[in-house]
């Protein structure tokens, strides 16, 4: 879970042809050790530890996605639940607790990264009272002539994902911007700062419209974790 994948061209050389095989998934390729190349004792220990941890991290990943569900509709997320669970598991094994540190930079629209659409730079501004995303828009990629407008969402998820009632979400949306406009716009999406000591992640989403309707194809969306409490 959480295995990093590559395009076929960017796949690193095989670490050991006698011990590894290539695996193809929807997200890309990776090398995996052949069955039987890991000692049985080590494998059993690892499996037992992962099984115990997954009882914590698996439900936590599901809670995160349930909270984000209003913003993930229309995205092509692939095996995102397993990916998030795997990243939370790595953190738990390393620190003994769950936080969002390894989710920084995570793309939710798996096959369509945010940067494919958004060519503008953005900054996250954090103060005692608020957290904001600032950007100047005007360089958003129009994927076809059907899409007419676009807008942004800043989404703040905070609290302990192990406890469903402790996990909270806040959001702020921008105005609509037309693909035919030539003047750049300064955008600031500001949200109240999360409570002191809480873990959080901040996501930026870009959505396109076809007239008055949201675009049908996932390629017209991008959504990414742009900052976590561990980045500060």
Image (cartoon, grey):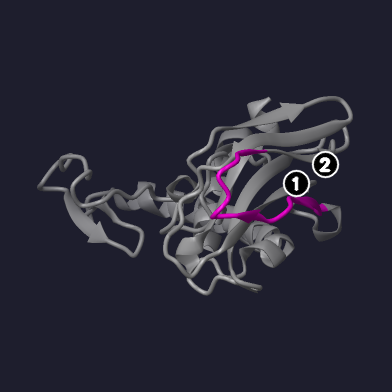
Please give left or right for residue 129 compared with residue 76 in the image.
right
- 11 shown above or below 195: below
- Is residue 79 visible to us here? no
Q: Earlier in the sequence, mark 2 or mark 1?
A: 1
Q: Quadrant of residue 96?
A: top right
> Which of 21/62 is in front?
62
Quadrant where the image shows the N terminus? bottom left
> In x, y percent, where is residue 124?
68, 31
In this view, the mark in front (2 or 1): 2
Q: Which residue is mark 2?
A: 191
> Which of 21/144 is in front?
144
Q: Quadrant of residue 125?
A: top right
> In x, y percent, where is residue 15?
18, 39
Q: Which residue is mark 1?
A: 156
Q: Where residue 57 is drawn, which disc sits there?
A: none
The mark tally for this picture is: 2
- Is residue 120 visible to us here? yes
- 38 shown above or below 124: below
> In x, y percent, where is residue 213?
63, 74
Dot 2: element: strand
Q: Are marks 2 and 1 in contact (CB under 8 Å)?
A: yes
What residue is rendered at 10% in x and 46% in y? 17
> Which of 44/83 is in front?
83
- 29 shown above or below 125: below
Q: Residues within 10 Å of mark 1 (few under 14, many from 20)?
A: many
Gap in angstroms between the C-alphas marked 2 and 1: 8 Å
What residue is rendered at 80% in x and 55% in y? 163
| Residue farthest toward the left in the current orientation of the protein | 18
For the magenta stretch, what is the residue range?
Answer: 167-185
The question of residue 88 being in magenta is answered with no
Q: Residues within 10 Å of mark 2 (few under 14, many from 20)?
A: some
């Amino acid at each position: 879970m959480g295995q990093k994948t590559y395009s076929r061209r960017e796949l690193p050389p095989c670490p050991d042809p006698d011990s590894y095989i290539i695996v193809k998934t929807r997200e890309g390729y990776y090398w995996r050790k052949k069955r039987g190349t890991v000692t049985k004792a080590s494998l059993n220990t690892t499996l037992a530890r992962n099984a115990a941890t997954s009882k914590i991290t698996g439900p936590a990943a599901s809670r995160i996605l349930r909270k984000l569900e209003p913003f993930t509709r229309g995205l092509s997320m692939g095996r995102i639940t397993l990916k998030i669970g795997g990243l939370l598991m790595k953190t738990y094994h390393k620190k003994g607790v769950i936080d969002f540190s390894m989710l920084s930079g995570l793309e939710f629209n798996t096959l369509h990264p945010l940067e494919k659409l958004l060519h503008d730079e953005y900054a996250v501004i954090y103060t005692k009272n608020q957290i904001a995303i600032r950007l100047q828009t005007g360089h958003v990629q129009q994927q076809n002539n059907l899409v007419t407008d676009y807008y942004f969402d800043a989404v703040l998820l905070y609290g302990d994902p192990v406890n469903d009632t402790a996990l909270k979400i806040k959001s702020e949306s921008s105005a609509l911007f037309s693909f035919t406009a030539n003047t750049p716009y300064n955008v600031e999406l500001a949200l109240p700062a999360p409570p002191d000591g809480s873990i959080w992640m901040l996501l930026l989403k870009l959505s396109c419209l076809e007239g008055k309707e949201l675009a049908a194809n996932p390629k017209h969306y991008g959504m990414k974790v742009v900052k976590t409490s561990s980045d500060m």
